[in-house]
Amino acid sequence: MANIRVAKRYAKALIEIAEELKKLDRITSDVQLIDSVIRSSRDLQLFLKSPIIKEDKKREILKEIFSDSRVDPVTLKFILLLVEKKREDLLHDIVKVYQQLYDEKMGIVTAEVTTAVEVNNSDRKKIEKKIIELTGAKSVKATYKVDPSIIGGIVIRIGDTVYDASLKRKIQLLREQLIYGS
């Protein structure tokens, strides 16, 4: 819990710096690159979390990975600051929180959509349009899952809010009505 709070402070600081320098898009793409590099390398994850490896070695390796114009100098300085403050193990959490803050700032809502069967592209567009209407967001980042146990219909999760229009839920409600009355 404390790590998330710390990650949020760093992510917030980075997004404020990015806005101030008018490099929000560039730094956001850097953050996404960093996230994909970290997720793709188990060795890098272990390296970042290792208390045995000295700060100088971590700085050297991270400079090697992210320099050569792969990331903006501001982003590289930020990564090196994390190493200096011994917070490099939070890099993945910081990236995640940064992305959430960026999405919030840009009016992008993240939704998890569950259906009983695979949904085609035209239906996905309709679902995303409905999510925009429900939330007032500018756009939607939706991930789609198939779960045959919901029988039919749709379940949409946006943050802590769940819109459950599944047949499974409707049957459950009907059953409760029959057992306990109206």
Image: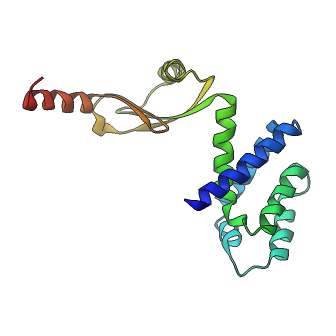
In the image, residue 137 sits, relative to residue 11, either above or below, namely above
Q: How is the image coloured?
A: rainbow
**Image-quadrant location for residue 46:** bottom right
Q: Quadrant of the C terminus?
A: top left
**Image-quadrant location for residue 4:** bottom right
In the image, residue 61 sits, relative to residue 154, either above or below, namely below
**Image-quadrant location for residue 20:** top right
Which residue is painted at 66% across and 58% down in the image?
6
Image location of residue 28, percent across then percent down:
76, 42
Which residue is painted at 86% across and 64% down in the image?
64
In the image, residue 170 sits, relative to residue 55, either above or below, namely above
Q: Decide which of 45, 97 is in the foreground and name it.
A: 97
Q: Decide which of 181, 166 is in the foreground and name it.
A: 181
Q: Decide which of 133, 150 is in the foreground and name it.
A: 133
Q: Is residue 70 visible?
A: no
Image location of residue 153, percent across then percent down:
33, 26
Which residue is painted at 71% across and 49% down in the image?
11
> Horizontal placement of 165 versus 97: left or right?
left
Which residue is painted at 49% across and 21% down in the image?
134
> Horizontal placement of 133 versus 71: left or right?
left
Q: Is residue 45 visible?
A: yes
Image location of residue 138, percent across then percent down:
63, 22
